[in-house]
Image (cartoon, helix red, strand yellow):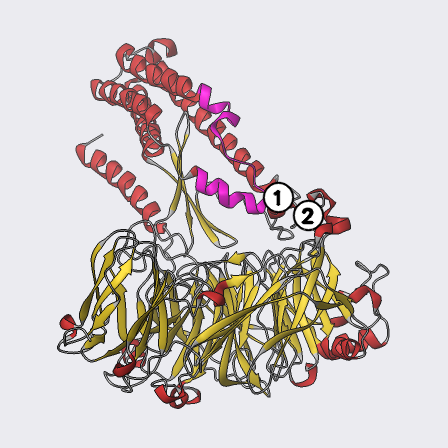
């Protein structure tokens, strides 16, 4: 054996080793098209094409982004307090977060849905649900503020919400956690789930002009977990489709125990029929409920909270023709209705196929009573095969949500296989798949839940971020990914970080909203009971230990800016009226040591900040929003004296005391 | 005659190779022998499991967490009797290599080669049977059941298992093992040739 042979041998070994390394499959890498930057670039001073209203998930708020730029435009406080603009801190907004459990400072805002007219977003309101303490919110798209919050009784977690009917006649709120109905009878053993736990689906009526929400009626159902829902449209208008999991009726270790049945259900509810029965007085009044109804009035700039104590309930088992169950493989999540209303797409989050149901076949099955032998909790179960339009085979793993474009295509998000899959609604063939980074939850096509989707853009809301952005410690922003879906293949254009954990979103053409956006509040229309009509009326009043400061703000001073005569033990209310009538001229207000937030007062608005001084001394206060060249000068002093002190109430700005 | 031939002393180069290989085998006890990588878009950092002679290494906990969806048994070192005996077996082979090098008997070289190949085959069969067992014996109550789907990773090479691409290759210890086998084969062949040439 010569040296040459040794060398050959060792070379062979090395080659073999490196070949195995070379065999290593390449990780999935998304090809980015060359002009992606151009397609998401919105030049300075120009506007995005779409507003995207995005749920904040555990932030409890709603965020507004522009598309295609992905720029964050605003965070609208809804269910969580927001110290930045005193949401839940000002006296005017505290009632908005009142519930039957008292003041709740946080919630989990899951889904957002537009108000619709004839199946198209009308740009008037956005509806949002809170999952933890069950509530519904309505956001006014002229002011981008929360106008109304309604608590939902008899409900465990309001996840299956706020999906609306074709003309927003109703917004739906259905329980994710079945619970015994409210009232003293609800103290039952938890393992008596099957006997005592029930589901409730609330139909919240929307007043056509004002948008005011009221619970019209509730449908009582067997104990199921309602997950998501879509109202029928077009041919299926008048129906509602709700995905239900835990048909096993497990109450513990749901991960395993609620994943046993091969099929759970999509519940088809004939809501027009339910409305008919309700109007005919067939429902039962339940009077042991308590739920808050909170409304914000833009005339008084003040919210009121009213506790309601009655709801009408229809038990679906009492009626033959209210609800039907469609078997749907493995714990369905999304139940999405195609733009024409013909098809219902069920996404079993543990399934390896996507069943597509036909509304026409469902009607046929119902009319010919083509049901399975056994009812489920008194509700007829239709035969899977009888109502199936077809199954999308091998689409991916863990389908969650489906949205649609205007060309007859469906887009489904796959959490487990971390991808978005495009498929044909008619042929059920998979047309394209793109990886998402990482593990997409919801996806949203512009107008993807409307009668005529706008198409063009798809946003994947990913649950896992990892290495997509510069690292920021253990807690990372969630990542959204924008795809262009106008071509045959989906093209990834942009990643952008989001606030909270976006679940669903709604993209609306900017033109539907931007011209209606309020610039200022008319100060002459301000009906706040503690409004200050101009600086001349600025004053300090004492009534017992209540001290009210009627303060005005205008560039660049606060009136009054010298306040004396406050005593320890007083409750001081700063009623701050912003006298400005110019666009984008808010003033802020904060005072040292206040166990409270700041105020951000819009032009023409009055807001109240409560302050209970804790010590004697001089307390500076100032404008917190940089308003003008002399913003730094926009400040003042409040003097706090001991209780019973003989320092008189005294106030002024610019001149010595009156 | 034959006996004399086989008991002839082997070349010093071969002795050196055998002794060095034996020492390298001692190192194998502490090194990862095999690795299984799982590749999926949502694991940009990769998921790896290392099989040592005495333990499992890498992100076993995370892999177990994923496997529970499909009902695969939990991977834990206690379930493998191999982990208690394998280090000793490797040590025995290492000693055998060194002894063969020191004693320099040609017959021992042949014996060692036979034993080593046998060990390699038994080890791979055993490994395969474990992979088969984990890939097929799934909990029927698992949340995700894909009809007809098994999750047996490949012995070597890669295979798509649902959303994961499973990639299985020897790791450093395995490569040393293979190298020892190749060198041992080389020594045996070379010695066999020398022996044949020396025949009258």
Residue A65 lies, with reference to residue A11, above or below; the image says below
Q: Quadrant of residue B89?
A: top left
Would residue A623 be seen by someone viewing this image from the given angle? no
**Residue A411 image position (x, y, % from top left):** 52, 72
- Residue extent of the magenta highlight: B61-85
Which mark is on residue B142?
A: none
Q: Classify the position of the C terminus of chain A by image quarter.
A: bottom left
Chain at numbered mark 2? A
Q: Is mark 1 on a helix, strand or loop?
A: loop
Tag 2 and tag 1, C-beta contact below 8 Å: yes
Q: Does the magenta stretch include residue B62?
A: yes
Instruction: Look at 41% across and 67% down and name the residue there.
Output: A91
Q: Classify the position of the N terminus of chain A by image quarter.
A: top left
Which SS does the magenta portion mostly show?
A: helix
Q: Quadrant of residue A156?
A: bottom right
Reading the image, the residue beneath label 2 is A250
Q: Is residue A375 magenta?
A: no
Q: Which of A159/B113 is in front?
A: A159
Residue B57 lies, with reference to residue A354, above or below; the image says above
Q: Is mark 2 on a helix, strand or loop?
A: loop
**Residue A109 image position (x, y, % from top left):** 49, 64
**Residue B20 image position (x, y, % from top left):** 24, 22
């Amino acid at each position: 054996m010569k040296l040459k042979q040794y060398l050959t041998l060792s070379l062979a070994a090395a080659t073999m080793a490196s070949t195995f390394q070379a065999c290593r499959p390449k990780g999935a890498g998304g090809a980015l098209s060359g002009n992606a930057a151009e397609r998401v670039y919105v030049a300075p001073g120009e506007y995005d094409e779409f507003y995207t209203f995005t749920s904040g998930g555990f932030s409890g708020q709603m965020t507004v982004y522009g598309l295609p730029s992905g720029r964050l435009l605003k965070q609208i406080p809804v269910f969580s307090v927001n110290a930045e603009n005193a949401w839940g801190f000002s006296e005017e907004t505290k009632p908005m977060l009142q519930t039957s459990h008292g003041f709740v400072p946080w919630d989990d805002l899951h889904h957002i849905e537009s108000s619709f007219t004839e199946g198209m977003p009308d740009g008037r309101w956005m509806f949002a649900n809170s999952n933890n303490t069950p509530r519904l919110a309505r956001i006014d798209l002229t002011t981008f503020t929360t106008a109304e919050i309604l608590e939902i009784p008899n409900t465990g977690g309001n996840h299956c919400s706020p999906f609306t009917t074709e003309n927003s006649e109703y917004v739906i709120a259905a329980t994710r956690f079945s619970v015994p109905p409210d009232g003293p009878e609800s103290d039952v053993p938890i393992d008596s789930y099957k006997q005592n736990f029930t589901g409730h689906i609330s139909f919240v009526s929307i007043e056509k002009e004002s948008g005011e929400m009221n619970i019209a009626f509730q449908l009582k159902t067997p104990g199921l977990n309602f997950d998501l829902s879509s109202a029928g449209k077009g041919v299926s208008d008048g129906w509602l489709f709700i995905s239900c999991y835990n048909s096993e009726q497990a109450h513990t270790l749901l991960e395993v125990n609620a994943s046993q049945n091969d099929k759970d259900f999509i519940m088809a509810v004939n809501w027009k029929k339910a409305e008919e029965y309700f109007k005919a007085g067939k429902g039962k009044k339940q009077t042991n409920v308590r739920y808050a109804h909170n409304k914000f009035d833009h005339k008084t700039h003040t919210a009121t909270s009213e506790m309601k104590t009655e709801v009408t309930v229809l038990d679906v088992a009492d009626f033959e023709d209210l609800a039907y169950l469609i078997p749907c493989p493995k714990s369905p999540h999304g139940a999405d209705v195609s733009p024409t209303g013909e098809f219902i797409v069920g996404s079993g989050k543990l399934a390896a196929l996507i069943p597509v149901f036909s509304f026409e076949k469902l009607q046929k099955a119902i009319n010919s009573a083509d049901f399975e032998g056994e009812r489920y909790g008194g509700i007829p179960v239709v035969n899977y095969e009888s109502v199936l339009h077809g199954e999308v085979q091998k689409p991916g793993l863990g389908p969650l949500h489906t949205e649609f474009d205007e060309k007859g295509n469906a887009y489904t998000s796959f959490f487990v296989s971390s991808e978005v899959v495009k498929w044909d609604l008619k042929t059920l063939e998979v047309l394209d798949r793109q990886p998402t980074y990482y593990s997409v939850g919801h996806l949203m096509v512009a107008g993807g839940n409307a009668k005529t989707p706008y198409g063009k853009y798809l946003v994947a809301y990913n649950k896992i971020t990892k290495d997509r952005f510069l690292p920021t410690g253990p807690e990372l922003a969630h990542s959204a990914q924008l795809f262009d879906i106008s071509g045959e293949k989906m093209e990834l254009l942009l990643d952008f970080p989001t606030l909270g954990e976006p679940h669903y979103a709604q993209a609306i053409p900017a033109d539907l909203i931007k011209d209606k956006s309020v610039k200022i509040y008319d100060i002459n229309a301000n009906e706040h009971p503690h409004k200050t009509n101009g600086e001349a009326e600025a004053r300090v009043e004492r009534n017992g230990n209540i001290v009210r400061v009627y303060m005005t703000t205008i560039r660049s001073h606060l009136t009054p800016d010298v306040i004396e005569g406050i005593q320890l033990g007083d409750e001081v209310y700063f009623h701050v009226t912003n006298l400005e009538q110019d666009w984008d001229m808010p003033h802020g207000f904060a005072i040292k040591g206040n166990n409270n937030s700041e105020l951000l007062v819009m032009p023409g608005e009055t807001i109240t900040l409560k302050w209970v001084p804790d010590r004697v001394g001089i307390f500076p206060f100032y404008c917190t929003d940089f308003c003008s060249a002399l913003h730094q000068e926009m400040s003042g002093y409040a003097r706090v004296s001991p209780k019973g002190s003989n320092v008189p109430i005294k106030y002024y700005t610019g001149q010595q005391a009156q | 005659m034959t006996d004399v031939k086989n008991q002839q002393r082997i070349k010093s180069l071969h002795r050196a190779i055998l002794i060095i290989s034996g020492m390298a085998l001692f190192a194998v006890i502490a090194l990862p022998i095999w690795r299984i990588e799982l590749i999926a878009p949502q694991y940009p950092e990769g998921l790896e499991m290392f099989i040592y002679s005495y333990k499992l290494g890498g992100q076993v906990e995370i892999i177990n967490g994923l496997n529970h969806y499909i009902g695969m048994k939990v991977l834990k070192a206690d379930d493998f009797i191999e982990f208690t005996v394998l280090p000793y077996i490797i040590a025995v082979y290492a000693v055998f290599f060194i002894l063969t090098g020191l004693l320099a008997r040609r017959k021992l070289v042949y014996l060692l080669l036979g034993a080593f190949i046998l060990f390699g085959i038994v080890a791979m069969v055993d490994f395969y049977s474990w992979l088969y067992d984990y890939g097929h014996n799934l909990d029927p109550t698992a949340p995700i059941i894909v009809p007809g789907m098994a999750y047996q990773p490949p012995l070597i090479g890669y295979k798509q298992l649902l959303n994961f691409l499973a990639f299985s290759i020897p790791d450093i210890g395995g490569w040393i093992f293979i190298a020892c086998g190749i060198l041992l084969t080389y020594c045996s062949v070379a010695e066999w040739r020398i022996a044949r040439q020396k025949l009258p």
